[in-house]
Amino acid sequence: QSALTQPASVSGSPRQSITISCSGSSSDVGGYNYVSWYQQHPGKAPKLMIYDVSDRPSGVPDRFSGSKSGNTASLTISGLQAEDEADYYCSSYSSSSTWVFGGGTKLTVL
Amino acid sequence: QVQLVESGGGVVQPGRSLRLSCAASGFTFSSYGMHWVRQAPGKGLEWVAFISYDRSNKYYADSVKGRLTISRDNSQNTLSLQMNSLRADDTAVYYCAKGRIPSPSGFDLWGRGTLVTVSS
């Protein structure tokens, strides 16, 4: 049950696009289309932003999109806004019916 | 109102026990698998445990196996986490989270969390 690998931090200017990567293995990210992404503002509970690699829950702006290639998933945020500044976590269903999170990425909007 | 509300956190000495609860409302609790996820102070999220909608399946992270036990009462819309032999590295905010159906991908509803501090 090793954590997925995410960059510690990314940054971008308003209206730009950024991408956060999430690397795993064939036992998790690469083996299932069950990757999800979460946004967490300081002192708040996480919020689901993407599930099943690329689907958005109702109410999540279409500026948020997800994809996967091999053992690496990605979250792209286009048209960055100040309120997007937060921590982002990826998660994947894994073998042995467990779940694993990434270490988290701090997004700074410059 | 669709929500999850955790309770039961507090300060506990190493080696002692604590029981967390999560009250669900606004959705058909008995239809969904449920999870516990924790977050140590200043750290990332860690998945802890899962219980299926009918209690037939329970899964745990290796770090808590044998010490933490997940359970649920569908008649009371309540999820629980019995925590035994607590260690300092169990210190964290504990969130309950609702799973999705039919896919195992995504925790789509979270509580606000309850803080557990293990310290002498």
Image (cartoon, rainbow, N blue to C red):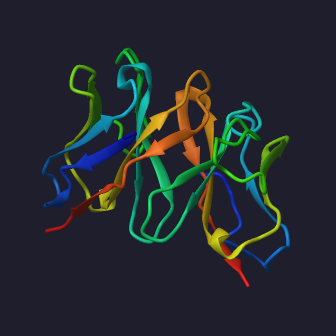
Answer with left or right where residue B45 lies relative to residue A38. Answer: left
In this rendering, the answer to whether A22 lies above or below A8 is above
Answer with left or right where residue A99 lies relative to residue B94. Answer: right
Taking the spot 59% from the left edge, 51% from the top edge, the residue there is: A3
| Residue B72 appears in the figure | yes
In this rendering, the answer to whether A80 lies above or below B60 is below
* Image quadrant assignment for residue A22: bottom right
Residue B30: x, y in percent? 36, 20
Answer with left or right where residue A69 lies relative to residue B23. Answer: right
Q: Quadrant of the C terminus of chain B?
A: bottom left
Towards the viewer: B15 or A34:
A34
As drawn, the residue found furthest toward the front would be: B1
Taking the spot 52% from the left edge, 40% from the top edge, the residue there is: B107
As drawn, the residue found furthest toward the bottom would be: A110
Towards the viewer: B100 or B43:
B100
Number of numbered discs visible in the structure rendering: 0
In this rendering, the answer to whether A55 lies above or below B17 is above
* Image quadrant assignment for residue B116: bottom left
Taking the spot 52% from the left edge, 67% from the top edge, the residue there is: A41
Residue B39: x, y in percent? 42, 59
* Image quadrant assignment for residue A33: top right
| Residue B66 appears in the figure | no
Taking the spot 71% from the left edge, 67% from the top edge, the residue there is: A7
Residue A12: x, y in percent? 79, 77
Residue A79: x, y in percent? 82, 67
Q: Quadrant of the N terminus of chain B?
A: top left
